Image: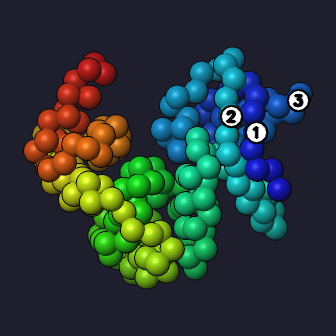
């Protein structure tokens, strides 16, 4: 199995990049955050997971070993495949997802396209004991994220824009209004 790759980014496409390693171009699927930080011609490194199917070998890349480990935990849940697990990782930081699962907040996971209420509840039941206890601040930021997300949607931001901005808000910032202010500041600095 391929555990880690390091090489030069040859191409960037929606959902994946081509990473040239030793003269071979590997197609590596990744989260939006991981791919957004890449530039063609620069060096990059990924912790990887190789999904072997009857008709394909798909390589998934992660910025940290922690993300890769969480991805593999998600795959242990019946009915969750690599694409769904990657979409869940796109939802929020690993610590926030761990907190949602540990606190039994299945509704947080239903924000992912293709993850319904039953599947989200199955993820919570299967992984609650495996994810471990989360920090109190992360749990408070989780509820603040839900409030801030709804407010940003009401202001006209897309779900993806709002979610991406909230991912960048430090977990030390707690409460819906504080997280909303910080997310709006992040969005404002992008323009």
Cα distance between the residues tagged 2 and 1 = 6 Å
Residue, disc 1: 5
**Residue 157 picture quarter:** top left
Which quarter of the figure is the C terminus placed in? top left
Front one among 173 and 181? 173
> Mark 1, residues whose alpha carbon is within 10 Å: few (<14), some, or many (≥20)?
some
First of labels 3, 2 by sequence position: 3
Residue, disc 2: 45
Front one among 49 and 155? 49
Residue 31, percent from left and from top: 53, 45
Which quarter of the figure is the N terminus placed in? bottom right
Confirm or deny contact between disc 2 and disc 1 (CB under 8 A).
yes
> Mark 2, residues whose alpha carbon is within 10 Å: few (<14), some, or many (≥20)?
some
Q: Is residue 41 above or below residue 181?
A: above
Confirm or deny contact between disc 3 and disc 2 (CB under 8 A).
no
Residue, disc 3: 22
Marks 3, 2: nearer the viewer? 2
Q: Which residue is drawn at 14% across and 49% down?
A: 176
First of labels 2, 1 by sequence position: 1
Q: Is residue 136 above or below residue 121?
A: above
């Amino acid at each position: 199995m391929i555990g880690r790759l390091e090489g030069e980014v040859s191409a960037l496409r929606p959902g994946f990049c081509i990473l040239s390693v030793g003269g071979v171009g590997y197609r590596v699927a990744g989260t939006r955050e991981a791919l957004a930080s890449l530039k063609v011609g620069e060096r990059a490194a990924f912790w990887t997971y190789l999904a072997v199917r009857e008709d394909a070998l798909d390589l998934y890349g992660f910025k940290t070993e922690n993300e890769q480990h969480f991805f593999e935990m998600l795959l242990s849940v019946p009915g969750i495949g690599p694409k769904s697990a990657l979409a869940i990782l796109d939802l929020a930081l690993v610590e926030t997802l761990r907190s949602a699962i540990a606190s039994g907040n299945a509704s947080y996971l239903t924000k992912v396209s293709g993850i319904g209420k039953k599947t989200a509840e199955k993820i919570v039941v299967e992984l609650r004991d495996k994810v471990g206890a989360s920090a109190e601040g992360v749990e408070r930021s989780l509820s603040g994220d839900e409030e801030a997300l709804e407010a940003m949607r009401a202001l006209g931001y897309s779900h993806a824009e709002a979610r991406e901005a909230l991912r960048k808000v430090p977990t030390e910032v707690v409460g819906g209004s504080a997280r909303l202010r910080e997310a709006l500041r992040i969005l404002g600095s992008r323009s």
